[in-house]
Image (spheres, rainbow, N blue to C red):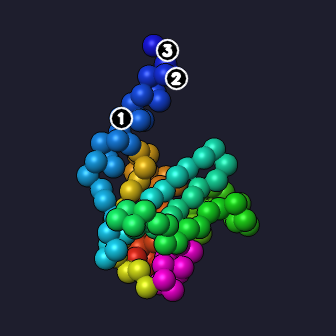
Amino acid sequence: MNTLQKKHTIFARRKIRIRAKIFGTAERPRLAIFKSHKYIYAQIIDDVKGHTIVAFDSRMSKAKTPVERAKEVGVEIAKIAKVAKVAKVVFDRGGYIYTGKIKMVADAAREGGLEF
């Protein structure tokens, strides 16, 4: 197993371990984060129904740095969630380590009014 395969295996195991413990309900849906090389995506999901309630991403962001884009995603997802009458969520970091952009999305969502 080369280094890249090992890195992907470790990430996949971490993601499965996290998702085994986290489940979104109608009262407390799951705030899931996905990070690609260029963009960051956030969606609020009701796992009981299997529906996405709210989604937002950084594709149309005007921010200069990736961390600023992540903050914008967190603020916007919180605004849209308020409109959809979602106040409490369960945070799913999606296997990513809780630093940098992931932490910025979470902090900005908390500032925007989401509880988790």
Rendered image: mark on residue 13: 1
> At numbered mark 1, what does the secondary structure look like: helix, strand or loop?
helix
* Residue 72 at x, y percent in the picture: 59, 69
- Where, by quadrant of the figure, is residue 1 drawn? top left
* Residue 18 at x, y percent in the picture: 32, 47
Q: Main secondary structure of the magenta part?
A: helix
The residue at 38%/42% (across/down) is: 15
Looking at the picture, which amino acid does disc 1 mark?
Answer: Arg
The residue at 35%/41% (across/down) is: 16
Residue to which mark 3 is pinned: 2
On whether residue 90 falls in the magenta region, the answer is: no
Number of labels in the image equals 3
Looking at the picture, which amino acid does disc 3 mark?
Answer: Asn
Residue interval drawn in magenta: 75-84
- Do the residues bearing badges 1 and 2 touch, measured as CB atoms within 8 Å? no
Q: Residue furthest front?
A: 49
The residue at 43%/49% (across/down) is: 94
Looking at the picture, which amino acid does disc 2 mark?
Answer: Leu
For the residues labelled 2 and 3, the Cα–Cα distance comes to 6 Å
Q: Residue furthest left?
A: 21
**Sequence-wise, which precedes: disc 3 or disc 1?**
3
Whether residue 104 is visible here, answered yes or no, is no
Whether residue 76 is visible here, answered yes or no, is yes
Q: Could you tell whether 70 is left or right of 11 in the image?
A: right
- Do the residues bearing badges 3 and 1 touch, measured as CB atoms within 8 Å? no
For the residues labelled 1 and 2, the Cα–Cα distance comes to 14 Å
Residue to which mark 2 is pinned: 4
- Do the residues bearing badges 2 and 3 touch, measured as CB atoms within 8 Å? yes
Q: Is residue 45 above or below residue 66?
A: below
For the residues labelled 3 and 1, the Cα–Cα distance comes to 17 Å
On whether residue 77 falls in the magenta region, the answer is: yes
